[in-house]
Image: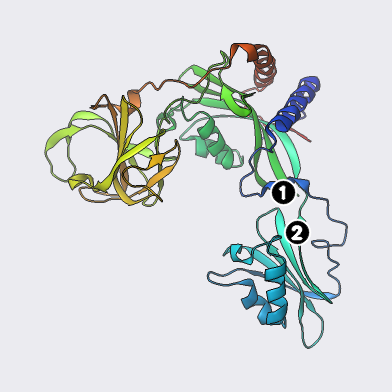
Amino acid sequence: MIEKKLGKLSIIVFLLIQAACNSQRTGHEPPVTGVSDSATISQPAAEGYMYGIIPDSFNLEHGRIRPNTSLSDILLGRGVSSREIDIAARNYSSVFDVRQVRAGANYTLFCERNQEAKARYLVYEHNPVTSYIFSFLDSVSVSVYNREITRELKYSSGTIETSLWDAMTGKNLNPSLAVYLSEIFAWTIDFFSLQKNDSFKVIYEELFIGDRSIGIGKIYGAQFNRSGNVTVAIPFIQDGRESFFDIDGQSLRKAFLKAPLQFSRISSRFSSSRLHPILRIRRPHFGVDYAAPAGTPVHSIGDGRVTAARTEGGSGRMVRIQHNSVYATAYLHLSRYGKGIAAGAYVKQGDIIGYVGSSCLSTGPHLDFRFYKNGSPVDPLKVEAPPVEPVLAENMPRFEINKTVVTSLLNTIDMANTRNFIQL
C-alpha cells in the first residue's frame, strides 16, 4: 500500500476549521469506538513514567479481570486492607464506581519490593484510553489517567471483491470504518447486494494511542459507487444536529433502514411460490430471509409502535411494528426479544427489537423480515422509503461551501487503492 502526504493543504486547513466550528456548535466530540468522552483531554506521559508513576522501585504484576471478580478480590491478596478498599470505593465513587469494573479489562499492580509485597498502586484500564489509579500510600485516593490520543486525517478508497468488510480488512484499514460507512449509507445502499467492482472513497479521522488504532473519529465525507450509481455523503449541521446529505442537499437518512441487521447475507428472497425447506411444498414467501449467526441483534428499520411480540405458529417468536398509517414490518424466527419489547411499546429507528434465532419452522438461524404497505406484503428490497427533511433554503449557502470542500477532496483520491494521510 502506498502512502504519501496530501496535497491541497489550504482546503484541508479550511476543512479542519469548519470541523472545529461544527464541534463547538454541537458541544460534543465525534464518537470514538470504545472510548469515553473524557479521553480527548489527555496529557502526554513523561519519559520513564507509567501512568504517571515511576515504576523503578516496584515489582509490577499484570493481569486481566476475570468474570465475577472484583478489584477487592485482587487487592486483598496483595496486602491492602478491607478498610482501605472501602475508603476507595465509598469516598471516590464520583471518580469511579467500582461496580463498573469490566471482565476482561487489564490491570497492573505496583507492589513493594519486600517480603510483604503490598500493592501500593492498582491501575485499572477501563478502556484503551482511560485508566483509574487506586493509590494506597499514606492515604487512599483514586484518580483518572488518560493516555494521549493522536489523530490522523486519512483518505481511503477501495473496490469491492466480496464485501465491504473484506475490502477494509484486506487493506489493513480499521474494520470499524466499515460499520461507520454502513451506517451513513444505510438508507440508500443495500449492503447485502453489493457487487464486484463497486467502490468507495472516504475522508476520515483515525485515532491512535502510539501506533495502536483505537477507533474512528469524524467522517469528513464519503462516496459510494454502486453499479455505476454514485452517492456522496456530505456532513452538515442543521438545527444543532450533524447529518449526512447528498450533493443536492437531500438527507441520506430515510424513513427506514435498508436492512434490519448488519453484515449478513440474503438466503431467500420475496416470492409468490417458493419451495418450503421443511414442508417441501410450494407456497408464497412474503419476506426476505437473512442468514446470520444465532444471537445477532435485529434492529427496527424505523420508528413505530410494537403491535405484537409473541409466538405465532410456524413464524416462531416474532415482532410486528406499525410505523405509520401506511407501513408495517415483521421480524420472524427470533431467539428472544429485545429489552422492553412488548405489544404497545414504542421503538425508534435502530432499536434492538430481538435477536436472530431458529424458532419453529426453520432449518437454521436466520431472520425472516417482512414489509407491509397498506396491509399488503411487498418486497422489502424494492421499497422506496421517503427521505427526511433536506437542507433548508436559508442554510443552502453554508451547505454549498461544505459541498465544494468535500467533493474537491474526494476528487483528489485516485482509485489505485492509495491511502494518504497527515497527522493532526
In the figure, is residue 197 to the left or right of 233? left
Position of residue 388 measured from the top left corner of the image (x, y, whole percent): 48, 22
Position of residue 16 measured from the top left corner of the image (x, y, whole percent): 76, 28
Choose the circle earlier in sequence order: 2 or 1: 1
Q: Is residue 339 above or below residue 110?
A: above
Secondary structure under the numbered disc 2 in the rendered image: strand
The residue singled out by tag 1 in the image is 38
The crowding category of the residue bearing disc 2, from other C-alpha atoms within 10 Å (few below 14, some 14 to 19, many at least 20), is: some
- Write down the quadrant of residue 382 in the picture: top left
In the figure, is residue 206 to the left or right of 278? right
Q: Amino acid at mark 1?
A: Ser
Q: Amino acid at mark 2?
A: Val
Question: Can residue 397 be seen from the camera position used here?
Answer: yes
- Point 65% across, 64% down: residue: 106
Q: Is residue 128 above or below residue 234?
A: below
- Point 62% across, 63% down: residue: 105
Position of residue 17 measured from the top left corner of the image (x, y, whole percent): 78, 26
Question: Can residue 3 be seen from the camera position used here?
Answer: no
Position of residue 392 measured from the top left corner of the image (x, y, whole percent): 58, 15
Confirm or deny contact between disc 2 and disc 1 (CB under 8 A): yes
The N terminus - image quarter: top right
Name the disc covering residue 144, or none.
Answer: 2
- Point 22% across, 29% down: residue: 271
In the image, 260 versus 114, the foreground residue is 260
